[in-house]
Every structure is written in structure tokens, then in C-alpha cells.
Amino acid sequence: MKRLRRVRDLMAGRMDSALAEALIGQLEATKQGAWLAMAMIGGDTGRTDAHERMRAIEHRGDTERARLVEELSGSLVTPIDREDLFRLSRSIDDVLDSLRDFVRESHLYRVHDQQRFAPMLDQVIVGIEALEAAVHDLASRPSVITHDALEAKKIGGTIRRMYQYEIARIFSGPVSAETMKERELVRRLEIVGMAISEAADAIADGAMKR
């Protein structure tokens, strides 16, 4: 009966709900990780506490990704190519992994002025929300997913430009251990932006093949 419901939904143009739920679960965990990083740099959460809490968030994301892979293996038909769904899930996982690394490295480096990273993290959250919108539309409004993917891609580009400005600022003065630590953390957020762009590309590529 479950398999028949899936076939009915896909013939009606709707995404398999189990696949959508797994992707949304991944994105929710990823957004939770981004908000935790934001709370850490704002001083609402200590570095050590954030480092420990991120482990549970990462575990949730890994669980949702494993669920998606399992659902993919049992799906008769998928709304976009399996490869593109797998790429999308992997890129979301890369976003969360890089946020984990950002929190971990902040814990290790103890950079004094963490608030400098707030604008980039704010765009990371906007990018994750854009990916959420794309996945929801992939399930219910496939005609608009190319536009959704483009919005997420633009945000990835914005994060890239912010990284370039931050690097210019960091190297405009004397190079020190502190500035090198800042550079590493800014680079980590650039990697997050790249993963958001890669997730958007996976959605757009899948939409073009429909």
C-alpha cells in the first residue's frame, strides 16, 4: 500500500513525501547548526557548550541523510534524478559539516572579535532557508524550483563576495597569529557558501532534466 501511494503521488507530479521529509530534516538540522554558531559568536552560548551541542545536531543531520539514502534505494521513481537528489543531500551535509568545523575551530582558536562573522552567518541562514523553500517546492510546486535554486545560488555568491572583502580587511594590516585565525574562520564560512551553491546546482540540474 505504501508503494502504491508513492506511485500515485509521483504520477500526480508530487515528490515522494519520505524523500522530502528526509531532505527537510537535513536542512532543519543544518539551520539549527547555523543558529547555534550565531548564538556562539553573539555570546549567548559559550564556545565549549556550542562545540558539545553541535555534536548532537550533526548526528541528527547524519541520521536524516542516512534515511534519504535508504529511501532512495527503495523508491520506484524519483521526482528528479537519483544522482541529483544524492548530490543535494551530500551538499547539505557539507554545509552542516563546515558549520561544525567553524564552531570547533572557534572553540580552539579563541578569536577575540567573533561578531565580525555575524553578517556572513546571517547570509548562511538565508541560504539554508532558500534551499528549504526549493525542497518544499520540489515536493509541491515543481514549476518554480528553478527560480528557487537561482535564489539559493545568488546567496552562495553573496557569501563568496563577503569572504573576499573580509580577506581584504584582514590583510590590510599587520599579519599576526590572531589575523591568521580570523582568516581560517572566514574561509570556513566561504566553504559553507560554496556548499550552498552546490546544493542549488543539484536542484537546478535535476529540474532541467525533468
Image: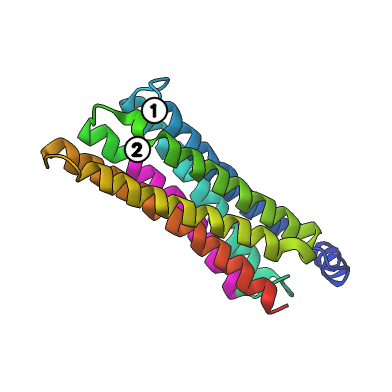
Quadrant containing the N terminus is: bottom right
Q: Kindly tell me whether residue 81 is visible in this rendering.
A: yes
Depth check, front residue: 62 or 139: 139
The residue range painted magenta reads: 83-103
Residue 92 versus residue 159: which sits nearer the camera?
A: 159
Q: Amino acid at mark 1?
A: Met
Q: Residues within 10 Å of mark 1 (few under 14, many from 20)?
A: many
Tag 2 residue: 103
Crowding at dot 2, Cα within 10 Å, few <14 / some 14-19 / many 20+, comes out as many
The answer to which of marks 1 and 2 sits earlier in the sequence is: 1
Please provide percent x and percent y for residue 184: 25, 46
What residue did someone put label 1 on?
A: 40
Q: Position of residue 52 (x, y in %)?
A: 36, 32
Q: Is residue 16 visible?
A: no
Farthest bottom residue in view: 209
Residue located at (24% from left, 40% from top): 182
Name the residue type under label 2.
Val
Q: Residue at x 55, y 57 (%)?
A: 154
Q: CA distance from mark 1 to mark 2?
A: 8 Å
Residue located at (69% from left, 61% from top): 147
Please report contact status of discs 1 and 2: CB closer than 8 Å, yes or no: yes
Toward which corner of the image does residue 4 lie, by quadrant? bottom right
> Where does the image place residue 20, in percent across and percent down from the top left?
69, 56
Q: Is residue 206 magenta?
A: no
